[in-house]
Amino acid sequence: MTDLVPALAVAGPAVALAGAVLVLLARTPRQTDLVAAAVALPVAAVAGLLAAIALSRGVDAPLRGGWRLVDPASGAFLAVIAVVGCCSVLVSPSYLRTSKRSWLSARGSRALYYCAL
C-alpha cells in the first residue's frame, strides 16, 4: 500500500491544478459550481486515501521521498484539510448566490473564488 504514496502525493495537487484550469474555462456560474464540485470529490478522495495510509502506519518510520514526508501527524492534518475543503466547495454555491457582486462578472468572480479555494 505504501507504494501508492508517491503517486498519491503527485495526483492530489495535479488534479486540483487541472480542476482550477477547468473552472477558469467554464462558461456559466452553474458550470463553474459543477466543475468545482466534480473536482473537489476526487481531490478529497486522494487526500483521504493518503491520510489513511499515513495513519494506518502508526508509529512506524515516516514515508520519505525527495520532497515529501508522510507521517501520522501529517496524515491527520491532511484528512482534516480534505474534509473541510470538500465541504467548503459543496456549500459554496449557496454562499455565492447570496453574496454581493464584485467588480467582476458572476462567472469570473466564482472562477477566481474556486481557484483560490
Image: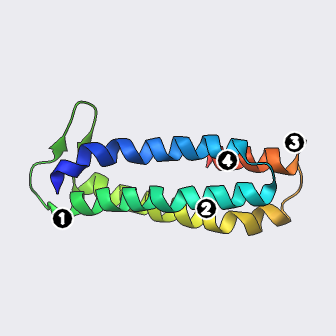
Please give the name of the residue rendered at 17% of the width and 45% of the height, measured from the top-left corner: 63
Determine whether the residue tagged by mark 3 lies in a helix, strand or loop.
Answer: loop
Residue 26, above or below 91: above
CB contact under 8 Å: marks 3 and 4: no
Instruction: Specify the quadrant of the image occupied by residue 67.
Output: top left
- Relative to residue 96, is residue 83 drawn left or right? left
Across and down, in percent, residue 69 comes to 24, 41
Badge 4 is on which residue?
A: 23
Residue type, mark 2 in image: Ala
Q: Earlier in the sequence, mark 4 or mark 1?
A: 4
- Relative to residue 14, is residue 116 drawn left or right? right
Across and down, in percent, residue 22 comes to 64, 45
Q: Nearer the viewer, mark 3 or mark 4?
A: 4
The disc at residue 103 is none
Residue type, mark 3 in image: Leu
Determine whether the residue tagged by mark 2 lies in a helix, strand or loop.
Answer: helix
Residue type, mark 4 in image: Val
How many residues crowd mark 3 within 10 Å: few (<14), some (14–19), many (20+)?
A: few
How many residues crowd mark 1 within 10 Å: few (<14), some (14–19), many (20+)?
A: few
Please give the name of the residue rendered at 70% of the width and 59% of the height, measured from the top-left corner: 33
Q: Nearer the viewer, mark 4 or mark 1?
A: 4
Residue type, mark 1 in image: Ser
Badge 2 is on which residue?
A: 37
Distance of label 1 from label 3 (alpha carbons): 45 Å
Q: Earlier in the sequence, mark 3 or mark 4?
A: 4
Badge 1 is on which residue?
A: 56
Badge 3 is on which residue?
A: 104
Q: Nearer the viewer, residue 77 or 106?
A: 106
Distance of label 4 from label 1 (alpha carbons): 34 Å
**Scheme by which the image is coloured:** rainbow
